[in-house]
Image (spheres, coloured by chain):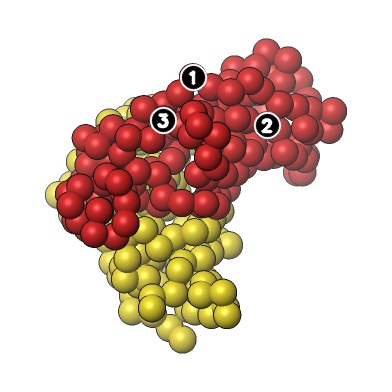
Amino acid sequence: MELPTQTFQVTRADLIRYAGASGDFNPIHWSDRFATKVGLPGVIAHGMFTMALVGRAVTAWAGSPDAVVDFGVRFTRPVVVPDDDAGTEVVVSAVVREVTEEGLTRLDVTATCLGEKVLSQARATVRTRA
Amino acid sequence: MPLDQSFVGRAYPPTAPYQVGREKIREFASAIGATDPAYHDPEAARALGHPDVVAPPTFAIVLTMAANQQMVEDPELGIDYSRVVHGDQRFAYTRPVVAGDELVCVNAIEDVTSRGGHEFVTTRTEVHTTAGEPVVTAWMKLVVRGED
């Protein structure tokens, strides 16, 4: 079963706010000067910010903010966030891989930016809504 | 300096307790745009059976990433952090993190591999309360990029 696609806008302001909230102040997430110096096309989103957006999608699909029991991703491609008002978009979709008799639902998740996958092996297990 | 298999299983002493604050959960939830009332309103969280506001599923990174400094800064392990990229991340929850938790992290090196000139270090962080109740286990794979 395919779940409804969810789209998240990501701007520079989001990255600054996430840096403060998470404590991850790596300059590749806020300084173009630093990001390009280390070979990136520009400022990129924290992988953990992208994962957090996927977490929002997963809890929305699960229908409960506390339903996630297992959640893992591999970061395969950076989410480049331009310095403008629109930023970029992360598009999250998923299919239900399994519904277990123990009351768990396993999801295979896909996250893309500009049509390219930014995560692989993205999987979440949530408690099945009663 | 190449990392080798002998580091697999290397364990670290428990970190100092991390006090999970209600406002920190609210701040984190707001930063990721998570508006569910259970992340912000203690009454909404209590209605779901929790003692206080619930943390979003990736909140644990706030403490596990900080705890991982133990390994990143381990001189014997010798990771060049300027070459480190976050490869994989996984959380396995016994229960959600909630405000009021006092959490201790216990780190270990779970795996070390080398491929294509890069090194891959998988860390495992067991997060439990100061009373010993398990809450979440986090795995983080660090990719140490080879010299250019």
- State the hue of chain B: red
Q: In the figure, the yellow chain has which letter?
A: A
Q: Which label sits in the foreground, 2 or 3?
A: 3
Look at 45% across and 23% down and name the residue there. Answer: B17
N-term-proximal mark, 1 vs 2 = 1
Residue at 52 percent of width and 72 percent of height: A104
Mark 1 highlights which residue?
Answer: B16
Q: Which amino acid does label 3 sit on?
A: Glu
Distance from disc 2 to disc 3, alpha carbons, whole Å, reads 20 Å
Q: What residue type is labelled 1?
A: Ala
Number of marks: 3
Q: Residue B102 carries which label?
A: 3
Q: Nearer the viewer, mark 1 or mark 2?
A: 1
Horizontally, is A54 left or right of A14 in the view? right
Compute the Cα span from label 1 to label 2: 16 Å
Where disc 1 sits, the SS reads loop
Disc 2 target residue: B108
Quarter where residue B134 is shown: top right
The percent coordinates of residue A1 (x first, y second) are 46, 86
A120 relative position to B95: left or right: right
Query: Do circles 3 and 1 both sit on a common chain?
Result: yes
Q: How far apart are marks 3 and 1 (CA)?
A: 10 Å
Q: Which residue is drawn at 20% across and 56% down?
A: B44
Q: In the image, is residue B116 above or below residue A103?
A: above
Task: For the C terminus of chain A, give its image quadrant.
Answer: bottom left
Q: Mark 2 lies on which chain?
A: B
Establish if B52 lies above or below B72: below
Q: Residues within 10 Å of mark 1 (few under 14, many from 20)?
A: few
Q: What residue do we see at 36% from left, 27% from top?
A: B19
